[in-house]
Image (cartoon, rainbow, N blue to C red):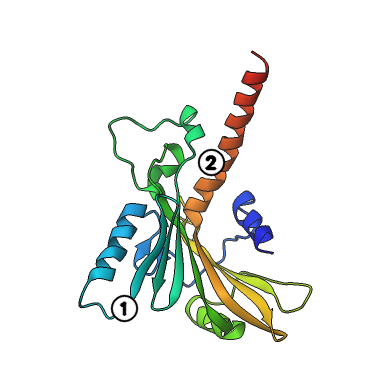
Amino acid sequence: MKKYLLILLFCFPGYLFSQTEIPNTLDGFAEASWGMTFESIREKFLSMATNPDSKEKIEILNEKKDVSLLIRRNGILYLYRFYKTPELLKEVRPKREGQPETDPTIDGQTEFRENGILFSVGVTFNLVPSEKIKEKLEAKYGKPRKESIGDDKVSGAAIWELVERRENPPRGGFAVVWREGYKKLPYTRRIDYFSANIRDIIAKDYVDFFSVQETKTLRDLIP
């Protein structure tokens, strides 16, 4: 189920979205905005974790530079995911020498990005009845854009589209609430949040990446 939805989100970018009005846009998660670098978010959590006046318990459990940052915050796990342009795309999209990387919401689609930027956050917690999670999200964002239910009538997912598509590039993101069966009732232990614009960047890079791979393969096969 998760693999199927991720294919919909990244390989068919227009499939889930429409031009309907939305009550809010999802411009990031908590203190982090989409497009923030790995280093800036890491430093933010280090500062919070070492602040003697902080009332929160924050730990950095695992990190992979420019790829992921796993945080435990007050007993809940947060996986911050980052994206940078694949090395292979240097051949078709060289980074402009002598110029700093710009905000990905402006022209990140056209440049080679060496630093990982935040595009998704996964939140994992103890099992909670799915209806309670849904009620909370509906109170803030309205009804989900799409829902799916598995053959067991319990598992599945609900997707909230929180994107302003009248802007170019689109601003906001979407949330995926996962359902699973426990004692024959639907429960949730994970929610994933994604940036709409950076998702589009990844989708374009995905196409370019395999185009370059194909060209290199043909060049090596036929000298």
Mark whose residue sits in front, 2 or 1: 1
Q: Which mark is residue 56?
A: 1
SS under mark 2 = helix
Measuring from the top left, give residue 215's x and y in whole percent. Answer: 61, 25
Asked if residue 160 lies left or right of residue 82, the reply is: right
Identify residue type, mark 1. Glu
Q: Secondary structure at mark 1?
A: loop
Marks 2 and 1, Cα distance to the nearest angstrom? 38 Å
At 45% from the left edge and 51% from the top edge, which residue is drawn?
Answer: 67
- Tell me which residue sits at (36%, 53%) in the image: 38
Q: On the rendered image, what quadrant is the N terminus found in?
A: bottom right
Q: 74 and 81: which one is in front? A: 74
Q: Amino acid at mark 2?
A: Asp
Residue 187 appears left or right of 45: right
Observer-nearest of 38 and 25 = 38
Residue 198 visible: yes
Classify 136 as above or below 171.
below
Q: Position of residue 5 (x, y in %)?
A: 65, 60
The quadrant where residue 97 appears: top left
- Residue 96 lies, in percent from the top left, at 35, 31
Position of residue 133 in the picture relative to residue 50 (left or right) = right
Q: Is residue 162 visible?
A: no
User: Who's the residue at 59% across and 78% down the image?
Assistant: 188
Q: Position of residue 142 (x, y in %)?
A: 54, 77
Q: Dot 1: within a 10 Å radius of its alpha carbon, few (fewer than 14), some, or many (20 or more) residues?
A: few
Binning the other alpha carbons within 10 Å of mark 2 as few (below 14), some (14 to 19) or many (20 upward) gives some
The residue wearing badge 2 is 205
